[in-house]
Image: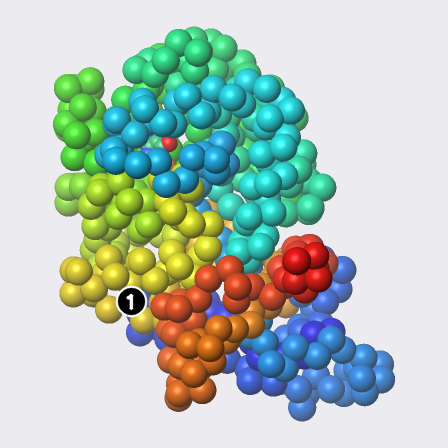
Amino acid sequence: ALRGQFFDITQVGASAQNLATNARHITDGLLFLNGGTIAALLPWDEGQRMLRNETDYLDYRDKLILPGFVDTHLHYPQTEMIGAYGEQLLEWLQTYTFPVESQYVSHDHAARMSAFFLSQLLSNGTTTALVFGTVHPQSVDALFSAAERVGMRMIAGKVMMDRNAPDYLTETPEQSYQQTRDLILRWHKRGRLNYALTPRFAPTSSPELLSAVQKLREEFPDTWVHTHLSENSDEVEWVKALWPEHASYLGVYHHYKLTGKRSVFAHGIHLQECEWDCLQHTDSSVAFCPTSNLFLGSGLFNLKQCMQKGVRMGIGTDVGAGTTFNMLQTLAEAYKVAQLQSYRLCASEAFYHATLGGAHALDLDTKIGNFQAGKEADFVVLDPAVTPLQKLRYANSRDIYEKLFVLMTLGDDRNIWQTWVDGKCVWQREMLEVAA
Ligand code: GUN
Ligand code: FE
């Protein structure tokens, strides 16, 4: 068992008010694990009686334990290009992204970068992610193999694209169908791994390619769909020009039956009212990627609208357009994006989005996202105050909500003490400190 301070959100909710009501804070609790499963989270007084002997627990009383963070959108092959200067989306893709992604034709490169990528996720407390590979099937083989070794719950897929990209990254719809199908058969539902059909976005897809995606989704209805939607104004205009017969950007995906539960659309910044309604009534999800949207100058995600419409939503780092793997820093930027639109993102809502809300957006909320008994034992042990400024500010915080808010405002990877996946500690800061 682990003894410490715990915080989670016990139920999926639709408003900041009911999320606050569903927040659970246990100042001194015991978390019991049964292998990779959570057996119980109890206050010390109750849990103590279940210990085999009085000291049979790991003592984390100066730490804060949260459910593992869920990153609902990022690109592992873009790890090596974070901070590419000067461009907005479409030029950024041409200038920086496509050349970098070409390197994943090499399985060795993909394997090396997969290991690095997973260590970045884990050292930032992220235990589940929905991930883009490149067009190369070997990129996804490498990532899934690495995730399987760690025991992580991960959803990923190879990019599908057949136009408006360099020749070295495009394929035919038939190849795309066949290679994706092979990957699904190899990886989907193998342990904790799941497959996402990953057409890059409408501009790099022909009608035939989206038909191939539709066909795969009909053949494998429990796979995920993962793509980009309405991120940048020039992109939205380009979609209108390429797909004049469709009334909206989301309308293109909807036409090919790619909306629905387990469909995750990254960004959704420049949406019309009818697109919000379509997301809502199809039960689709959006990934809010604040650092990316600011870095590429894409725009401000309308969190208030999303909450009012009751659209499933999770937070994405969107590395490498996003500027960090760290969920605390990402929440800080989400708060500022909301502030610019007069929406108050409180700490309980923010941490909900980063944990159970993200799990709900991925349709994984029955498996991960909080400390409910029976769920998978993925969690992060935080050191809530590591710098002099954090220590000062922490000491001056009244309650857990203020502490969490300060943590997301001032926090970063230094606050991640340990990351547990499948009931095992898979990363810890101590090792880093000893090595340094
Ligand atoms: N739209 C299409 N591809 C991409 C990508 O790689 N990153 C981002 N941020 N948006 C995209
Ligand atoms: Fe992206």
Left or right: 197 with respect to 303?
Answer: right
Left or right: 228 with respect to 221?
Answer: left
Compared with 404, 207 (above or below) is above
Compared with 65, 307 (above or below) is above
Compared with 257, 407 (above or below) is below
Residue 106 in picture, x, y percent from top left: 59, 19
Left or right: 189 with respect to 15?
Answer: right
Q: Residue furthest right?
A: 53
Q: Quadrant of the rendered structure where residue 65 is?
A: bottom right
Q: Residue at x 40, y 87 (%)?
A: 396
* Whether residue 217 is visible: no
Residue 371 in picture, x, y percent from top left: 58, 68
Q: Residue at x 66, y 86 (%)?
A: 44
Left or right: 321 with respect to 158?
Answer: left
Residue 415 in picture, x, y percent from top left: 52, 67
Q: Which residue is mark 1?
A: 345
Q: Residue at x 22, y 41 (%)?
A: 298
Q: Residue at x 40, y 81 (%)?
A: 393
Provide the secondary structure element on which disc 1 rests: loop
Compared with 252, 373 (above or below) is below
Q: Residue furthest front?
A: 436
